[in-house]
Image (cartoon, grey):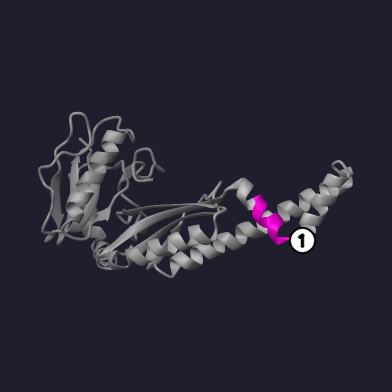
Amino acid sequence: MSTYVYGITAAAHPALPEGMDGVGDPPRRVRVLTEGGLAALVSEAPAGLRPGRRDLLAHRNVLARAGDGGCVLPMRFGSVAPDDDTVTGVLAERADHYRERLRTLDGKVEYHVRAGHIEEAVLHRVMSEDPELRALAEAGRKAGGGTHQSRMRLGAMVVAAVQAREAEDAAEVRQVLEAESAAVSAEPDPTGWLVNVSFLVDRRSAGSFLAGAERLRRSRPHLDLSVNGPLPPYSFVEPGPAEPAVSTAGRGHRQQEDR
């Protein structure tokens, strides 16, 4: 039977959730594997596991229970090793890396931020800021729509203005929120979003981080800005010096109930 891995922590962690229910139907019992001062929270891996809400919540609940007592390196949903020995072997091989990550991430949480433009609002914004655009648009209206050439010129200018606004807004969002965070992890494919970024934030600074996000919302009402968190620091558990020894079923699925 393969082994499902929820997270990695210190063997001395005071709140290891051994004996609670994990993923699967029926739910598999959570166990603790230890090696060299580290511990992995695991269970048997159900066959055909998919990222349904019940199993996503079970994965999250194991991490939340363990996180109440200290730092846990969360594994993505669907992380599976061939067996228990493989898991303890990884703990031994990458012990230095995992200890460094536990020290670095202690007391920190992740906030995932997405920002995009509200189309009508951003068009109104760029028109209000550019007298030449307003003059061209007004001239076109008075001329019953204007010539094909004038319409093309106006369209190109609007596109350029919106693109400039996209770049400015994306830079501003990142600048404001990076100032309140310890690290940043951008999504590899931000398609459809100006910003699609995870921020590592000290729990004690979470209020300042969220206040920064709220200031951005107020100052830029043409932005659709969403902040999800606090989350376990999924995006900051960097790979160790060797290739991962676990596979991820449904790779690419985040903790969907939190996103």
Residue 249: give x, y in percent of width and height: 34, 38
Query: In the figure, 178 relative to 258: above or below?
Result: below
Find disc 1 in the rendering and name its residue: 131
Is 24 a magenta residue? Answer: no
Start-end of magenta stretch: 123-131
* Res 82 visible: no
From the image, which quarter does the N terminus lie in?
A: top left
Residue occupying the point 33% across, 33% down: 50
Q: Position of residue 52 (x, y in %)?
A: 32, 33
Left or right of 240, for residue 36? left
Q: Quadrant of residue 220?
A: bottom right
Q: Secondary structure at mark 1?
A: helix
Which residue corresponds to the image point at 54% horizontal and 55% vertical from the top-left? Answer: 221
User: Label 1 amino acid?
Assistant: Pro
Q: Is residue 100 found left or right of 34 in the rendered image?
A: right
Give the camera-side residue of 211 and 161: 211
Q: Quadrant of residue 104?
A: bottom left
Q: Residue at x 27, y 34 (%)?
A: 54
The quadrant of the picture occupied by the C terminus is top left
The rendered magenta stretch, by its main secondary structure, is classed as: helix
Residue 193 position, x and y percent, is 54, 50
Q: Which residue occupies the foreground of this view, 83 or 49?
A: 49
The part of the image, by quadrant, that contains residue 28 is top left
Give the vertical position of 99 relative to 123 (above or below): below
Q: Is residue 6 above or below residue 199?
A: above
Please indicate, yes or no, whether residue 94 appears anywhere in the rendered image.
Answer: yes
Counting from the top left corner in percent of width and height, residue 75 is at 29, 50
Give left or right: position of 202 versus 83. Answer: right
Badge count: 1
The residue lying at 21 percent from left, 42 percent from top is 83
